[in-house]
Image: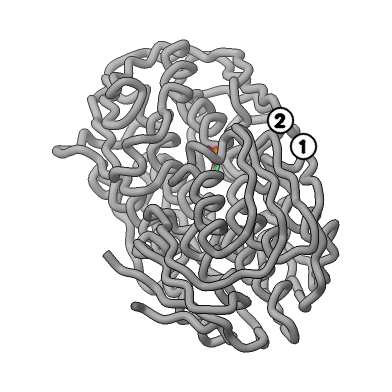
């Protein structure tokens, strides 16, 4: 098991371009694989999660070339062209891979088995199995968790469903199954979530209409290959936004970050806390809004996170907890129950780690009150959760002592090279 040692670093400075967006990279492989023709992907995230998705499609008979780092050419097999795999499909740590693939594979002519690592095998899959079963899919699970056995040869029918949780993975699974279904599939969300699947389906020529919280798709229309430029991942940028905000004297420029409004809830909350973050050079990359984000150190104060912002920053709570620990006063998080079923229970894992470093955190079932204070050193267990590991590397930059962060190998699932990049900008962060 690999660990990091992190401690007080230098002010952060210079420019950073973080790796490609994880959500977009997964979807680019998936839609490229079922399209007709060759899809070129640039800025593909070379992370464990997205490589697992690419390897799965190779097992399903799709040729995927990797001519250089961050580039993939997916030779689409068409809507009906995937082949039966000869072994289980390993999603590793990737919830997005498992949930979206469950939808994408539900209407195939062959059986598939999806497996994952220990963390993924604990995560809830019933939420995706149930709407797919209503479409006619037959999916067996281990009491609602992976491994999932998807029975082939089922004719799917479109449904009109309101999802029980605001989850882009769930919405996407239903839409991908809808591509194989008879008739129309309508998905309504309790709160709008990231709309990459809808945008990308439209770019590939699918018959889809969508608006925040709503999507309607008519299945069966062949997808046309396209080219996709993946923006830099806001969720990876988030660690640098918080780091530069809390380390005195910092000024950092994050280049070409995806700023889809369904992802940038943390920007609003950090600004409400007093952060100094400006957007420069607004543009577009692969149909997605991007901007350079300039962040300067600022004194932060506690805030109440608006409940309606929670889905727009669902992956950013480890970073937000760090900002809250360094702020003056209390930060209140509620309505974030979903954090308990991420790669780890992110409320409990962040609370435990921050307490170890001297911060008072009062947990509630759906959030926490984080009381800003002075941080000292200590030993943290990341529970193999990539974002928890990176969050503690950030907070260590202003701790009064050394922080040892355990079990950090999974950082490579979403942000390969994080430690080297962070070091190059001023972090004090080393393999133990
Ligand atoms: C994702 C959706 C979110 C997010 C995950 C990526 C996606 O999960 O936490 O990291 O790519 O659709 P939920 O749909 O479970 O909220």
| Dot 2: element | loop
The residue at which mark 1 appears reads as 308
Q: Is residue 121 above or below residue 72?
A: above
Question: Is residue 231 visible in this depiction of the protein?
Answer: yes
The quarter of the picture where residue 432 lies is: bottom left
Q: Is residue 46 visible?
A: no
Q: In the rendered view, does 182 fall on the left or right side of 218?
A: left
Q: Residue at 75% of width from left, 51% of height from top?
A: 331
Image quarter where the N terminus lies is bottom left
The one nearer the camera, 8 or 362, is 362
Q: Quadrant of residue 126?
A: top left
- Would you call the spot at circle 1 few (<14 residues within 10 Å), some (14-19), or many (20 or more)? few
Q: Position of residue 200 (x, y in %)?
A: 59, 44
Tell me: 174 left or right of 337. left
Mark 2 Cα-neighbour bin, 10 Å: few <14, some 14–19, many ≥20? some
Residue under circle 2?
Answer: 191
Q: Secondary structure at mark 1?
A: helix
Measuring 69% from the left and 30% from the top, which residue is drawn there?
A: 209
Q: Quadrant of residue 214?
A: top right
User: Disc 1 to disc 2, how far (Cα)?
Assistant: 8 Å
Q: Position of residue 135 (x, y in %)?
A: 46, 13
Q: Residue furthest left?
A: 86
Identify the residue at image location x=55%, y=64%. 357
Q: Earlier in the sequence, mark 1 or mark 2?
A: 2
* Position of residue 321 measured from the top left corner of the image (x, y, whole percent): 64, 55
Check whether the beta carbons of the residues at disc 1 and disc 2 lie within 8 A of each other.
Answer: yes
| Of the pair 391 and 18, the residue shown nearer to us | 391
């Amino acid at each position: 098991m690999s660990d990091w040692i992190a401690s007080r670093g230098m002010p952060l400075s210079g420019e950073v371009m973080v790796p490609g967006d994880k959500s977009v990279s997964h979807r680019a492989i998936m839609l490229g694989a079922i399209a007709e023709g060759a899809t070129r992907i640039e800025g593909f995230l070379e992370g464990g999660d997205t490589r697992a998705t690419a390897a799965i499609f190779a097992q399903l008979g799709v040729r995927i070339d990797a001519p250089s780092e961050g580039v993939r050419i997916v030779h689409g097999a068409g809507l009906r062209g995937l082949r039966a795999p000869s072994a289980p499909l390993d999603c590793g740590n990737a919830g997005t891979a498992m949930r979206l693939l469950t939808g994408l594979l539900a209407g195939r002519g062959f059986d598939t088995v999806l497996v994952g690592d220990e963390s993924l095998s604990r995560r809830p899959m019933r939420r995706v199995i149930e709407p797919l079963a209503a479409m006619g899919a037959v999916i067996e699970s281990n009491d609602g968790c992976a491994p999932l056995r998807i029975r082939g040869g089922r004719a799917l029918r479109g449904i009109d469903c309101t999802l029980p949780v605001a989850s882009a993975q769930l919405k996407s699974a239903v839409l991908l199954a809808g591509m194989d279904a008879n008739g129309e599939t309508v998905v309504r969300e309790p709160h709008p979530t990231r709309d990459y699947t809808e945008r990308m389906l439209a770019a590939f020529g699918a018959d889809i209409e969508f608006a925040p919280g709503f999507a309607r798709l008519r299945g069966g229309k062949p997808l046309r290959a396209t080219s996709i430029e993946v923006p830099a991942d806001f969720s990876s940028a988030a660690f640098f936004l918080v780091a530069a905000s809390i380390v005195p004297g910092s000024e950092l420029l994050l280049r070409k970050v995806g700023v889809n409004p369904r992802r940038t809830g943390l920007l609003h909350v950090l600004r409400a806390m007093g952060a100094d973050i400006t957007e420069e050079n607004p543009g577009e990359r692969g149909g997605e809004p991007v901007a350079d984000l300039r962040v300067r150190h600022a004194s932060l104060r506690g805030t109440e996170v608006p409940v309606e912002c929670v889905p727009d920053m669902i992956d950013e709570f480890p970073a937000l907890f760090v900002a809250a620990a360094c702020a003056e006063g209390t930060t209140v998080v509620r309505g974030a129950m979903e954090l308990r079923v991420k790669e780890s229970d992110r409320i409990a894992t962040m609370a435990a780690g921050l307490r170890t470093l001297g911060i008072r955190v009062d947990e509630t079932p759906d959030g926490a009150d984080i009381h800003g204070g002075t941080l000292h050193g200590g030993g943290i267990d990341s529970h193999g959760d990539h974002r928890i590991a990176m969050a503690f590397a950030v907070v260590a930059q202003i701790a009064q002592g050394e922080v040892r962060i355990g079990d950090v190998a999974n950082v490579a699932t979403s942000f390969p090279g994080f430690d080297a990049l962070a070091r190059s900008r001023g972090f004090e962060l080393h393999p133990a």
